[in-house]
Amino acid sequence: MTSGIATVVFALGILGLFLLDRDRKSRVSPALWIPVAWLLLAGSRMVSEWLEPVRAIELPDQLLEGNPLNRLILTGLLAAGAMALLARGRRAGTFLRANGPILLFFLYCAISVLWSDYPDVAFRRWTRAVADVVMVLVVLTDPDPSAAVKRLLARSGFLLIPVSVLLIKYYPDLGRAYGPWTWTTYYTGVATGKNGLGYVCLVFGLASLWRVLEALRGREDVRRAGPLIAHGTVLAMALWLFWKADSATSLGCFFIGASLIGIMSLSGLARKPTTVHLLVGTLLLLSLSSLFLNAGTDLVEAMGRDTTLTGRTLIWRQVLRMTVDPLFGAGFESFWLGERLEKFWRIYWWHPNQAHNGYLEVFLNLGWTGVALLGFVMVWGYRNVIGTLRRDPEAGGLRLAYFVVAAVYNLIEAAFKGFHLVWIVCLLAITVVPEPSSREDG
């Protein structure tokens, strides 16, 4: 099959996925396409990278410049999302009041821009991070938030997953890349690297698994074959992409999230908080012991990684020797800039730009104050997830999976940052959805 024919076949297949998953009974706002566009960009490449070949960043100063086209598009989406929230009036205000801890964390992030060595760059990055919250609120303030979450994840997954398969098989110049020293092939799909493809499969693979189990649990008179076929197809594609991407972190997290979704689907178990706490605690303990206490060396090596976690532990020791304010950090997303970045790029040929640990990354940028605020958000968010699980086990199962996956993923990747899919779905999971009031407009 030629690439042109394959493109037509995949386009028709994607259209078929949308038709199979169509639900005439639920109505969501057209504004939902704004966060869909945001997720599509977060899970793939910036517009400038699609328009011209990706050029490797050779000098640290290139990270300070940014791209005017990308900035314009992201600012436009942020403005559109903000306008959608303003149109929803009191409903949006109710959400803001109910989610104070998240706002407090982002307020501190904004204040930390003041002591960054590059405040203009830090402010741009903070604006992009705040846009994640705006997009989550656009979804959850929809008149039917449950349907909006399903449509958000389905629309994004139906595009990113099949197009990744198309690019890898028929457009190798776009869907594959080569190691600069070994020239071994690795697969990127719509993303810019194999880890990016990994977390695309992680986020949308879990969403499709959730929908498959939902369809299988449905009563015979309401069960619909369409969503089962559509999401079963996307799930199969995601599993194939996991194999091609060889992203051990995302694959391990997928198994954890899939286990939680499957177990929470068991009748009555989701409404037993003690059992849920024990299960989550066990999973977190196993993850920590396997990664850091050498208790799971065989497991780590079985996934194709060494006990240094592919050099991550060396990076951790190195960054902890760097001089930053332990209480307040280097400023929002500012550690990997300037002289510090230059030093690491002189040492490591692969040019690291993150600590490969989300908690350590927060410490470097925001200090212990930021770590404490993030910890407060996570504890508060977990309480919200458990509350949702008790009220609505179906929706709560996915929220719990996304929350635990984010907690584990950040042990060996830095994902507590703006415009990262894992952080966005974590915010989606922990955000409180207050009951609508009769006085709320919009």
Image (cartoon, helix red, strand yellow):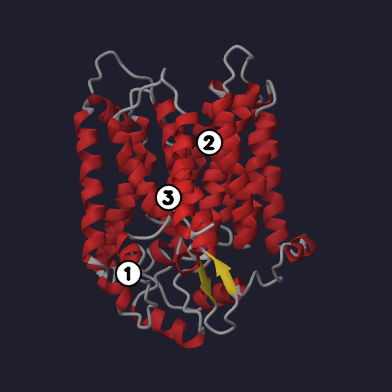
**Image quadrant for the C terminus?**
top left
Q: Position of residue 399 (x, y in %)?
A: 53, 36
Residue located beneath label 1 in the image: 52
The percent position of residue 19, horizontal first and vertical second, equals 45, 30
Compare marks 2 and 1 and give the one earlier in the sequence.
1
**Within-10-Å neighbours for mark 3: few <14, some 14–19, many 20+:** some
Front residue of this view, candidates 181 and 83: 181
Q: Is 157 located above or below residue 199 in the figure?
A: above
Are the residues tagged 2 and 3 within 8 Å (C-beta)? no
Q: Quadrant of residue 50?
A: bottom left
In the displayed structure, does residue 58 sit left or right of residue 357? Answer: left
Q: Where is residue 80 drawn, in percent x and y?
A: 22, 42
Q: Alpha-carbon neighbours of circle 2 within 10 Å: few (<14), some, or many (≥20)?
A: many
Q: Residue at x 56, y 72 (%)?
A: 316
Callout 1: SS: loop
User: Would residue 366 be found to the left or right of residue 295 on screen?
Assistant: left
Residue 289 is situated, as x and y percent measured from the top left of the image, at 72, 57
Which callout, 3 or 1, points at the residue further toward the start of the chain?
1
Three-letter residue code for mark 2: Arg
Residue under label 3: 373
Q: Which mark is on residue 399?
A: 2
Q: Amino acid at mark 1?
A: Glu
Which of pointers 2 and 3 indicates the residue nearer the eye? 2
